[in-house]
Image (cartoon, rainbow, N blue to C red):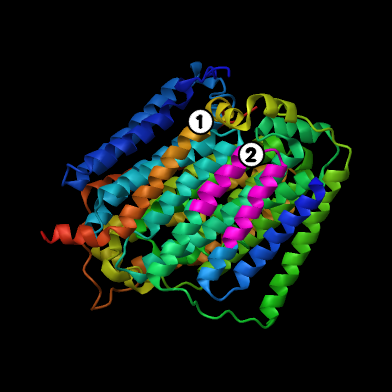
Amino acid sequence: MEIYLFFLFGGIAVVGALAMVFNKNAVHSALFLLLTLVMIAGLYVLLNAQFIAVAQIMVYAGAIVVLILFVVMLLGAELGESIPRWLTLRNSVMVLLALVFLTVSGTAVYDWLYSTQPITGTVTDEVIARQGSVQLVGESLFTQFLLPFELASILLLVGIIGVVVLGGWRLVQHRQRGE
Amino acid sequence: MTAIEIPALNFAALLPLFIVVGTGLLVVVLDLFIADKKSLGWLSLFGVILAAIVGNMQQGGAGFDPAFQNVSLLDGYANFFNIIFLSTAALSILVALGYLGRVGLHRGEYYALLLFATSGMMAMGMATDLMVVFIGLETMSIALYVMSALNRHSRPSGEAGIKYFLMGSFASAFLLYGMALTYGATGSTNFSDIGSVLTAGTVAPMAMLGLGLLLVGFAFKVAAVPFQWWTPDVYHGAPTAVTTFMSVGAKAAGFATLMRLLMVSFPAFAVDWQLAIAVLAVLTMTLGNVAALAQKDVKRMLAYSSIAHAGYILVGVAAATTEGIKSVLFYLLIYAFMNIGAFAVVGVLEQKEAIGTKLTEYAGLARKNPWLAMVMALFLFSLTGFPPLAGFWGKLYIFRAAVNADLTWLAVVAVINSGVAAFYYLSVIVQMYMKPAADDAPEILPSTPATRIALAVAGLAVVLIGILPASLVDMVAKGVFG
């Protein structure tokens, strides 16, 4: 059962990603992105990571896609420049290299999946069922990964300051002119 | 539901980092109340120096235990990199104090961003866990993207910002994919745990793939060929004070993490990554130097020269020995002083709208401003590697490390490259000393005391390390990890 669901979610995610890249209309692209993100949330559920799945839908599907749609509509950039669809030499080299990379990485991952590596780690299905994945995530954030977690707040602050510095320059000019 | 127990954290080890972050936060808040942005610059400088003093006092003290559940470690290696990052930050603040006011970009946020970028670099130097590496790298990078685009009225600056942002995000994606595959193959994000799993187990192709992607990501960040092509545009387009900072800081941070990661996590694949790094080194040195020969603009030429220097440093990394690490540490500190010095001079001569950076505009500088011409010549000679300046010793140690690691061919390529590099460094000196100034040459604006302090400190460091390399060699010897 799980394997069929995996291929269902994974397949739709790949189709959605391709449709996003090849679509001319930016709004349609954003909607296909939404489709891909929701399907990936489905994959997280299959991996017993319910909390991540919910966070994925809330943060990416909910907030980020909405933000992208806002920006697209505010800029009036629904119809972007058309992408050349024919295969030029450059494009075909890029596609070829991408396929090579896909083959190599696919082989490596396949090899690992079917090697007889024992699955290690303390977070088993049984532990998740007992504690719930929210608590597990929270616990590792506040113990093992406390430092990255706290540093991430600095990262976000830098992002906010960056927006103000780059976006608020007109405001600064007005203020300097004493308006 | 059981309560979460917060484990022992060892805050003391991260004290220098916290001082820098704290100063950054203070600058953000004070920026609202203080109209004189220069005082914010001096405050930032004070914070940076305080962090450096505290860091050095901690050496040999209690700070050596792994901190925060073994995700970061303030060992001699991290401390040495902290010295590099903090001196880079301090000199860049001094350069910015003079430069930003002159080009009309003086904003308090600049210093806050610079401090946060420095804290990201420090986190990378201390990181022993991929999670910390990534967060530190992003903190540094995002601050640098914004700083590159600071000059909103100039197209090159905007182009630099967007180009750096797009290429940098791309690089981060590679890095993250590499981290994910490494984690998948080994079940850990901790450097030494990854190392022990890989050493014990059969060689997993997935971990190898992860290593490859990590290398690509870091090659982007340190601007190694063939992942360099954003560099000239970004370094040229960004305000010179920003170029000064990122051409040294971002590179040093990339190398700090790369070396620790390769030596601690991937010794099992040493043969493979040594070859990869050696190839990168050859390409980077050669392309950087050849392209620099053709440049007519000094700022752009120095951008290519910094690519070439990344190549020399990669030679030291390729050696994969303790001696190699030492030579890289040695080189990076020297590179920080000479490169910042050279860019600072470019900043002094630069007027608004990119006037004053062309090679021909350096003609007759020795007559117009002998001091400035002298320090510029000093930095350029050091970048070339003339004895007895610091740059010579830096190159010597790197080449010797390569020869001792049986990479004599690589050392030979590097020596030939240093010879090629002499052409374009000397052409600037020829312009300054032997060509008369054009009649319509722009007037040189007087440099501010802050810039003069920066130039004097960098110049003295280049000369003193050149005459007395032994003291730095001793310092470097303490900067090696396990």
Q: Dot 2 falls on which chain? A: A
Q: Is residue B227 above or below residue A78?
A: above
The residue at 71%/51% (across/down) is B212
Q: Dot 1 falls on which chain? A: A
Q: Earlier in the sequence, mark 1 or mark 2?
A: 2
Q: Which residue is mark 2?
A: A50
In the rendered image, is residue A98 in sight?
Answer: yes
Magenta-span inclusion, residue B320: no
Residue A67 spot, x, y in % from top left: 44, 58
Residue B292 spot, x, y in % from top left: 51, 67
Residue B244 spot, x, y in % from top left: 39, 53
Circle number at residue A147: 1
Q: Depth check: give the residue in front, A59 or B199.
A: A59
Residue B65 placement, left or right of B152: right
Look at label 1 and name its amino acid. Answer: Leu
Q: Depth check: give the residue in front, A54 or B195.
A: A54
For the residues carrying marks 1 and 2, which lies nearer the camera in this image? 2
Q: Which residues are magenta?
A: A33-62
Circle number at residue B386: none
State the count of labels: 2
Q: Quadrant of the C terminus of chain B?
A: top right
Residue B146 spot, x, y in % from top left: 39, 55
Label the magenta part by its dominant secondary structure.
helix
In three-dimensional space, the C-alpha distance between marks 1 and 2, rounded to whole angstroms, equals 24 Å
Evaluate whether label 1 is on the same chain as label 2.
yes
